[in-house]
């Protein structure tokens, strides 16, 4: 996954950059719905990553010392969908963790939708297939499941 970090009123050191990349890259395992190559040729162009994340961190104000004045925003782009989360906190690392948790919930929901859509299409295709009984028995042996005979 490609992670782009932008800062506002904060100096980005190597430790903070590694922390943000580690937290955001943990979300890549939920993006396993998009099987295949890491890079693809399609809507985004040749050789672009399948999943991209833009993270913006910063301070909401320069002069306040009380209240949640650190914020973190993250936007992830997938083929056909874009997810976004924001958080503000007293600690910058805590704000990044909150953003990660929010995106994780959105990713799980999106992944379930994609899987359900794919399974729905498979059910329709299986129902539309008209196979003779001998071929059906062979498929059942290979898959180890029973295919219901509906209207055949």
Image (cartoon, rainbow, N blue to C red):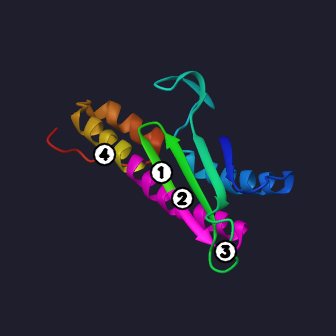
Q: Is residue 129 above or below residue 93?
A: above
Eye-nearest disc, 2 or 3:
3
Q: Quadrant of the N terminus?
A: top right
Which of disc 4 and disc 1 is earlier in sequence? 1
Q: Which residue is mark 3?
A: 64
Q: Residues within 10 Å of mark 2 (few under 14, many from 20)?
A: many
Eye-nearest disc, 1 or 4:
1
Q: CA distance from mark 1 to mark 4?
A: 24 Å
Q: Residues within 10 Å of mark 3 (few under 14, many from 20)?
A: few
Residue 17 visible in the current orientation: yes
CB of mark 2 within 8 Å of CB of mark 4?
no
Q: Residue at x 57, y 45 (%)?
A: 32
Q: Which residues are magenta?
A: 85-114
Q: Residue at x 22, y 34 (%)?
A: 128
Q: Which residue is mark 1?
A: 83
Give the percent coordinates (x, y) of residue 142. 47, 38
Q: Residue at x 49, y 40 (%)?
A: 78
Furthest-front residue in this view: 63
Which of disc 4 and disc 2 is earlier in sequence? 2
Q: CA distance from mark 3 to mark 4?
A: 53 Å
SS class, disc 2: helix
Give the percent coordinates (x, y) of residue 20. 72, 55
Give the percent coordinates (x, y) of residue 23. 70, 57
Q: Which residue is mark 4?
A: 120
């Amino acid at each position: 996954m490609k992670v782009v970090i932008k800062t506002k009123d904060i100096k980005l050191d190597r430790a903070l950059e590694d922390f943000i990349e580690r937290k955001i890259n943990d979300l890549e395992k939920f993006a396993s719905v998009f099987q295949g190559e890491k890079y693809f040729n399609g809507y985004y162009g040749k050789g672009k990553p399948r999943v991209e994340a833009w993270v913006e961190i910063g301070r909401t104000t320069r002069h306040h010392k009380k209240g949640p004045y650190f914020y973190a925003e993250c936007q992830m782009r997938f083929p056909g969908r874009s997810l976004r989360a924001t958080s503000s906190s007293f600690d910058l690392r805590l704000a990044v963790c909150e953003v990660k948790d929010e995106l994780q919930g959105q990713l799980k929901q999106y992944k379930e939708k994609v899987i359900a859509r794919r399974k729905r299409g498979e059910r329709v295709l299986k129902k539309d297939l008209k196979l003779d009984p001998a071929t059906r028995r062979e498929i059942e042996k290979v898959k180890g499941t029973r295919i219901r005979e509906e209207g055949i």
